[in-house]
Each structure stands twice: as structure tokens, then as C-alpha cells.
Amino acid sequence: MQRFTGTVSRGIRAPIIRQGDDIAQIVVDSVLAASKGEGFPLRDRDVIAVTEAVVGRVQGNYATTDQIAADVAAKFPGGHIGLIFPILSRNRFAICLRGIARGVKKITLMLSYPSDEVGNHLFDDETLDDADVDPYRDVLDEKKYRELFGYVKHPFTGVDYVEYYKQLINDCGCECEIIFANDCRAILDYCKSVITCDIHTRKRTKKKLILAGSDKVVGLDEILTAPVNGSGYNENYGLLGSNKATEDTVKLFPRDCMPIVLNIQKQILEKTGKHVEVMVYGDGAFKDPVGKIWELADPVVSPAYTPGLEGQPNEVKLKYLADNNFAHLKGEELKEAIADYIRKKDSDLVGKMVSQGTTPRRLTDLIGSLCDLTSGSGDKGTPIILVQGYFDNMTAE
């Protein structure tokens, strides 16, 4: 029977998930109920994905600001730290900042400008163009920053993050000094003990600071890597990937996810005979062209996935074949020629002209981004995503 659809992504509704719940069982039951209730069959190589938010919740992987403060105080007994390159986010960083501020006496906060690592802007790029400032070299204090750029509120949140972070630190009884720079080494003129908050560039930043003479460099990925006073933790990412849970608590990025994805895969095989792939996903890896925000504030798109999701797509570009190899054909003859080419394509198309324009990204990043867009971050109530047909091509029936 001829198929008329390719990839389909479905949000699967689930019950409200709480700490201690059996997340694997909930995922399996929800997918099977959706399949039965809405009449679509499961197939081999379907992908079942569950958001990291509910995985972290069932694990009870939470930490309070006091627990964050205790870890920071133990790591920085001197009381004065340089805190560099945080993202501008009430959800992602503000509660972490409150915990850090409670653990020290003074913070020299260094913000990158005109935007943070993931594209949240303090002010427009055009405003920077009009100022006589070199963002690669110039270090600004708060007074100079205000003279040049004024008081700008984020267009999405209505928050002046400079004022917001400063007030938050002061409210914790911590002294705050703010500077603006894009060279991580600038902080060493103010403080030799540094917490670096960048996500994807953190390894390079740490290396540069150490070579430049920092006394101590700790990343967010090194805070709460083990339990502190009964806290949750993440041995690989620490505070990276955390989200606000309450005004005094963060939910950490989930840990030990491989047993969960393998359990889901095993249960589906036992109940349906189908071999599906399974992954835990967080932020998608895409950029908003209007807001300029790069969505990926998590350290990785997927902290765990079944082995069948390893690797990259190996696809040919249909329009290239139609315009070049088979430009003399049309209709069914063209369709069959392309289908035959796909059946016989090389197992590794890297560097081949016929694959130009395809997306050379990891499967988990691509599928995780699709899942994040499907589930959204609001009230859809679909923390589970079923992706079907992703590994098919036009030859699949």
C-alpha cells in the first residue's frame, strides 16, 4: 500500500507526573493508550521521547538556594568571587544566582555584551554600532554602560537584567559590582577566584582563565556534582541545565537516564513486538530569527538515548538529483530513477556533492529539536513525543 505521509510527530498526553512515579511505565502506558485510542500502529524504529523536566521531577532531583550556597561557600571560603558570563534568564539562572550570592560576601558580576551566550540581548546590536566601543576589547563599568546604553528592558520579559541581577544579589546580603566584557580574562583584574557560567564554551573559558593566572576556576557544571546537605545533584553537569522550581528551589538536569530509556524500549518490544528507539530530550538546538535567542540553554539536547540514535543522517538531496543526475527525466521515470539511486546510495555520504544542503547534525539534536518544538514549554500537557517515519525515505511503503 502506498504511503502518503513521511515523518509524523505526535505529542502524547500523560498524567501529571510527580516525584517517585515510575516514569518508564507512565511513558509506555501513555503511548500504548494513544495508539489504541487514536488508531495508529507503532512501527519498528519509531522514536519515543520524554522531556527531561519530568524525568528530573520523578527523580526528585532538586536543590535549594541554601544547598547551593553551602557548596559555593565550601569551594570559595575567601568570600569574593568573579561570576562571569551568566545567561539572562529568570527561569534558568536567577535562582542559581540567589544561591551563589548567599554563599559569598561579594560578587563581581561580569556580563557579556550586547548579548549573552544564547542570544538574550541587553540591548540591540544596532545600539552597539552607534557607540564608540569595541566589544572584543573594551571593559565597561556600570556607570559607563548606563551612559552608553541606558536602561533597556528585555522585549520578551520586560526586565532590565542588569538591575534585576544586581538587586537580587544585594537582597541576599551580598555586595555586588558589575562590569561588562567579552574576554573572560578581564575578570582577573577584579578577582582571581572565578565561577564561569557559560554553557557551551565553558571548557575553553576555564582553560584561558587558568593560563592567565586565576587562583581558582569553577564552572556551574562543578557545583552540586554530589549531594550537599541532602540536595539533588548531577555528577556530569552540576547546575547546568537547571530550571526554576520555586522561588527558592531549582530542578536539576536529570541523571542516570540510560536505564530509563532502555526500560521503555524493552517494555515496548515485549508488549508490541516493535523495536523502537527512545530518548530523553531537553532544549532543542535552534535559533529564533526574530528574538535572536538560541534555544539550547541545556548542556546537551539529549542526556540519554538508545544506541540506534547514535550518528548523523545519511541522506541525498532530491532536488540535486532531479536537477543534475536525472535532469533528462520526468514523471514516474524520474521518480523511479531517484528511488533506485536512494536504494543504492553509499553508506557514508560525507563530502559527496549529492548530499550538499542536507543537515550534518547528530540525530539526537535533530530529533530532540523536533520534540521540543512539538511539546512546547507551556500547557500542552504532552511531555512524551512519538516520532514516526523519521528514518524512512521516499522508497518506504
Image (cartoon, grey):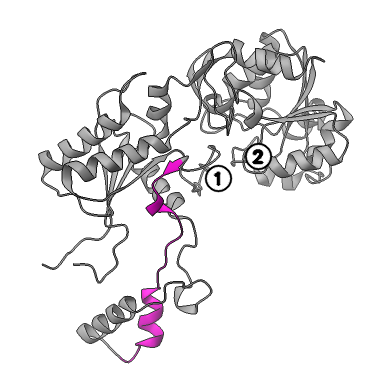
Query: Can residue 219 be seen here?
Result: yes
Q: Amino acid at mark 1?
A: Lys
Give the left or right position of residue 294, taking residue 172 as reference: left
Tell me the SS state at disc 1: loop
Quadrant including the C terminus: bottom left
Query: Can residue 376 be seen here?
Result: no
Q: Magenta includes 170?
A: no
Q: Name the residue carrying label 2.
A: 115
Give the left or right position of residue 29, taking residue 93 as reference: left
Residue found at x 82% / y 32%? 187
Give the camera-side residue of 117 and 215. 215
Image position, residue 346 (x, y; %)? 41, 76
Give the left or right position of residue 202, taking residue 105 as reference: left
Q: Which residues are magenta?
A: 304-328
Tell me the SS state at disc 2: loop
- Would you say the residues marked 1 and 2 are in contact, meaning their CB atoms lie under 8 Å apart? yes
Residue sitting at the far bottom: 328
Q: Is residue 393 above or below residue 159?
A: below
Q: Magenta includes 310?
A: yes
Give the camera-side residue of 188 and 259. 259
Q: Name the residue carrying label 1.
A: 292
